[in-house]
Image: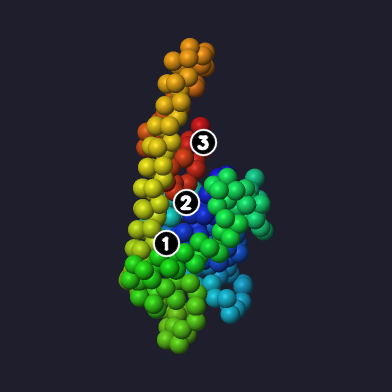
Amino acid sequence: MPPHLRMFLALLIGTASRPEALLQLTREQCDLKHGVIDLNPPGRARTKKRRPRIPVPEFLRSWIESVSFGPLVTYKSKPILKINGAWRAARNAAGLSPEIVPYTIRHTMATELITRGVPEIEVASLMGHAMPNLRTTGRYVHVRPDFLANAKQAIDEVASAIDRVAARSMVNFNMRANSVLDSTAKDDTPMHKSQKTVGFLPEQMVGATGIEPVTPTMSR
């Protein structure tokens, strides 16, 4: 995936938010000191599609820190209104069904949180769903030390699981790649030096494994 799509997907996993809210999310809305993201930008009226305040999962901090100011999801340093094209390209490359859309991640994360025993009221608050007892307390709940603690922990657990799967996938990829290179070498076919170094350990391929943000160093 290109960097802007990786950022978008990390935000989807880390917030379970609506895609349009994440495309509009800015660095200024992310208070890392207090560990809170306000999905409702300044000046925007609160609508039926609530954009709540949510906690910052630990895995998402490095992604947010990689942006100095402005929108978190950008392409060529410019904000993005729609991400459909990049999403379709990545989905097709992964061989996934056309039914897999950004909203699928939101629904999947809600399912994961419920499956992992996160209280319904926390899931509702994270997703921006209206609940009677959240109407009056919702504006204050984010100042509590245990603010959506169960939801935050569950999200980090999901991120860790994805990281482990990605690491195993990279190991399997390198084993297959090295096998191909070995068979090619036996045929005495000339190979460029760079072709002989395809295999890397997962921890060496930081930019290509897990869910770490891509930095200039990783790109090199």
Classify the position of the N terminus by image quarter: top right
Residue 63's mark? 2
Q: How is the image coloured?
A: rainbow
Residue 107, percent across and down? 49, 67
Q: Residues within 10 Å of mark 1 (few under 14, many from 20)?
A: many
Residue occupied by mark 3: 219
Residue 192, percent across and down? 52, 17
Question: How far separated are the C-alphas under marks 1 and 2?
Answer: 11 Å
The answer to whether 95 appears left or right of 81 in the picture is: left
Mark 3 or mark 1, which has the lower sequence index?
1
Residue 56's mark? 1
The answer to whether 60 appears left or right of 41 in the picture is: left
Please tell me which residue lies in front, 110 or 143. Answer: 110
The answer to whether 184 appears left or right of 79 in the picture is: left
The amino acid sitting under disc 1 is Val
Task: Kindly identify the residue that appears in the image at 39 percent across and 48 percent down.
Answer: 165
Please tell me which residue lies in front, 167 or 121. Answer: 167
Question: How far separated are the C-alphas under marks 2 and 3?
Answer: 15 Å
Image mark count: 3
Task: Kindly identify the residue that appears in the image at 42 percent across and 79 percent down.
Answer: 140
Residue 138, percent across and down? 45, 80
Place residue 46 in its image quadrant. Answer: bottom right
